[in-house]
Image: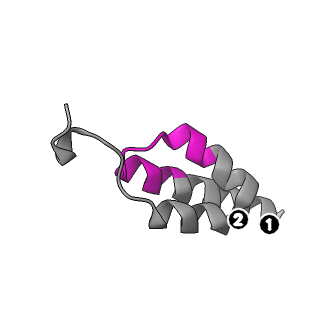
Amino acid sequence: MEYLILWVVFGFAAASMAKGKNRPAVLWFIIGLLTGPFAILIIALMKPGPGPDQGYH
């Protein structure tokens, strides 16, 4: 049971980081559920996606 909660936390953490980098949060939540801490590592190393704060329109 504890491991299930931990994997859900990884999903939420990956989704939160993805949202901050203008990436699709739902997709990264699912990736976080499936890969756990590896999703957090991947999204942490990614550059931010295009968005209004990067000057792209």
Residues at discs 2 and 1 in contact (Cβ within 8 Å):
yes
Q: Quadrant of residue 27?
A: top right
- Residue on which disc 2 sits: 6
Work out which residue is located at the far top of the displayed protein and give it. Answer: 57
How many marks on residues? 2
Q: Residue 29, image x and y in percent?
A: 60, 47
- Residue on which disc 1 sits: 3
Q: Specify how the rendered protein is coloured.
A: one colour
Circle 1 SS class: helix
- Kindly identify the amino acid type of the residue bearing the numbered disc 1: Tyr
In depth, the one of 20 and 53 nearer the eye is 53
Chief SS of the magenta region: helix
CA–CA distance between discs 2 and 1?
A: 5 Å
Q: Residue 19, image x and y in percent?
A: 41, 47
Q: Residue 34, image x and y in percent?
A: 75, 53
At a point 19% along the width and 45% down the height, the residue shown is 53
Label 2: few (<14), some (14–19) or many (≥20) C-alpha neighbours in 10 Å: some
Asked if 38 appears above or below 57 in the picture, the reply is below
* Placement of the N terminus among the 4 image quadrants: bottom right
